[in-house]
Image: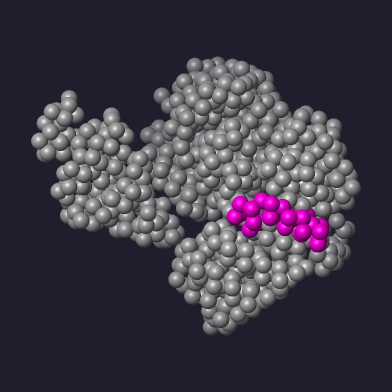
Amino acid sequence: MKPIQSWLPLALLLALLAGCSNEDQMSQEEVEFLSHMDQAQFFREQGELQASTQEARNAMELKPDQFEPWFLIIRNLITAGDGDTAERQLDELAERIDQEDPRNRENLNRMALARAQARLIREDWDGAVEALNSLREPERNQQITAHRLAGDAHRQAGDVDAAREAYKQALDTNPGATMAHLGLSRLAWQRGDKEAAREHLEAASEQDADDSEVWLWRARIAHQEGRFEDAAEAYTQALEGIGRYDVMTRRKYETISLLIEVLRENGNASQAFVYEEMLANSAPGTIRSGMRAAREAYDEGNLSIAAGHLEEVLAQAPGHDDAGILLGIIRFQQGRMDDAESLLSEHEDKVDSGELTKMLAAARIQLQRPEEARRMLEELDPEGNDPGVVALIGVAALSSGEDQLGRAMIEQSLAMAPDNTDLRVRFARYLASEGNSEEAQEQLETAIERAPDAEQPRAFLARFLAENGDHESARKVVDQWRSDQPDSALARNLAGDVAQLRGDTDAARQHYRDAIGMDESPASHHALGALHARDGNAKPALEHLRRAVELAPDNPRYLRDLVSVAANHDAEDATRDFLARVAEESDSATAPHRYLLQVALESGDDERASELVAAIETRLDDSGQRASVIAGAYLAAARTTADRGNDGRTRELVRQGRQRYKEHEGLALFEARLQFEADRASDARDILRSIKTQHPGSPRPFLLEADYMASEGNYSQAADLYQLARDKSDSPQTVTRQVRVLREAERSRRAIEVLEAATGKFPQSSRLYLELAMLQQNNGNREAARSAYEQTLELAPDNAVALNNLAWLLHEDEPERALELAEKAYNANPEAASIVDTYGWILFRNGDLERSIEVLESAHELAPEAAEIREHLAAVHREAGNNARADELTR
């Protein structure tokens, strides 16, 4: 018999209790007990652990002899990461249960698993194994969980062989454990067995090819092997999942940085530039003295110091309006949109300020909540008289997919305020991204005409032209810029960039030298150093990159490139010494300290790491920034040691990092991922529950748990978790993942409902329309499928899958249109056997027998085992009188 779950729906519990009772009706006490348990589970599923625990305690007071409230509280504690309290609760529960009674075996096993989870949280690896050894005849599901927990304990303890064995046991019980395959792949790669590493990577990919971790590991392998084109493609695929976040998270930043590196190595400067631009734009004793100090620091431009004072004020007075509003403004200016939106929304009804409303609206646009932003703005300026409000409404409309309205509103704003250069350049960027090159160029030329001293539109126009292959026009723009502004070092730098894009490295080198001679900017040194590095000139490359770091020690790109070039030319020790000197000489920079901290952590030099942590803390007054820098270094070091297969050091780094910054979401998620990989799902969920409490607006813990549930084949639960993630922050990528698991759960009707709602929310997502079309087609809804395919092709006219599938839908009723679509699909992807087969068969149905045979033969060559292709080819040969060939195909 399966173990009773720690919570059952209220109706089912009512039925169970009614069946066990000698009375015709339940008592009021029983009804209240079930109601409290129902609410406890509801709050738990919503991530509200405190409310869930309180409801469970209410239930416990009513029926102290029932075990389910105990287990729910313990699960909540484990979720919150409180292993100590969880084990104390288990000790108390153990005193209430007869451990010799065989009827209690199920609950005793549940307690053993929970105790192991609690000890893993406490990093008591041996104790966790001891708890697992106390299991008595566990059920199969409990055995699987126990193997996972034991494997996790061994891995955390640094026992690589035992961890490997645990991965294998996980695969024996569940061959679809994606992260187990990836773990084995990383271990194999570390010991030099590349073939085994690839085998496990492909096995993981077969289970979930869209998993961002699969793509990331594939990218890292390609990167390390120097297959930069493959690495770039894999990093790009990984970013589809990682990049869904509205802010530039460290993980997203690091992945984009790696992508830039491989794009540069692959000679794709224009694409690298696009991503580089993305990165570039991404306790006083009393409340009164704290506010005064905060305002003074803010007026002087010291945002981090001001934020530190304000955090202290809010710690003393959580509802302080002025402190909350000013901190929200600072977070907005720092680009921390989640924090800005949270802080400003608390006070939006208390302050009559149009500027604050605009700021809050802008934050919500950044957080992919454009509909809310638009409603606020329309209420602020119903007549459309404020060009700033009109512009923001336009941006909100574009963000929600209403291109026509968005463009009209931005054009209206520019007509009202034609000298708004920033808006005009942003609009040009949007037009360029949509493929409207001529309009984008017109907007940039207008910006230059109206603001001839502004450098931003000239720089963007020159790069835009060069990236689109119009090198001569780009050169003319730069030449005119240099003529109009002869003292502009940026113009010289752009001249160098444009020269690089047209392949003239000698000219580029000279332009960068000229820029350095005019104004020794770090950008010029960096550009020249990077160019020397690409040419293989290590010495001048290192000289210029070091100078760039000296001039701008907090620029992560300059630092990253210096470290990369140094690693490629055996200059790592000298570079570390150089960075130590830079760190010592700088009073405020933290990037060199962060790099040195990461190196110390990776090498196990904890004493040096402590010194660097102290140095960083003295430079940063903002607790949020301290957490970002220091915890970020721990996280980066843990990832590196994990990739090297040093599981013990990885666990130690995560433990140390979380000890310092318990609420750092990235570290907590990484630890949860490690627990899942080690098949310690209960421990992972405990961590995730804690994250949900500490970061109630974040979708990330729900996404991680959903991905894990999907990898384990628990598709319905995964779908529910994806929905909870979407409730926090929605995106087409998350919708796609939810639909995938709904299909696996054979809940196609629900999947269609989800997609129909999502296409209304994200009307510019061709991927969602394609998913909807394929589902409708599979369900036999031909007209609905056709409509969705047509919408897909409006958004993505060259989508080969949509072209192929729509052609097949129409080939009987509209053969000419079907042939046109099939031919276009074939031209777009002539190596896809199914697409070639569709084209060949439709040629046959349109009477082109000779061409049909030729095309279907090529489809058969691409997929010789495909039965449907053989049937089509045989039918066409028989029609042509080639009976021998037809018989050969049908044998």
Which quadrant, please, contains the C terminus?
top left
**Residue at point 24%, 36% (across, down):** 857
Q: Residue 701: x and y, percent?
A: 57, 43
The magenta segment is 497-524
Residue 484 position (above or below residue 308):
below
Q: Is residue 509 magenta?
A: yes
* Residue 181 screen position, x and y as percent: 52, 27
Residue at (21, 47) in percent of width and height = 842
Assign the magenta stretch its main secondary structure. Answer: helix
Residue 273 drawn in magenta: no
Does any portion of residue 528 appear in the rendered image? yes
* Quarter where residue 227 is shown: top right
**Viewer-proximal residue among 29 and 256:** 256
Q: Quadrant of the N terminus?
A: top left
Q: Does residue 54 appear anywhere in the picture?
A: no
- Using the image, determine if residue 836 lies above or below residue 888: below
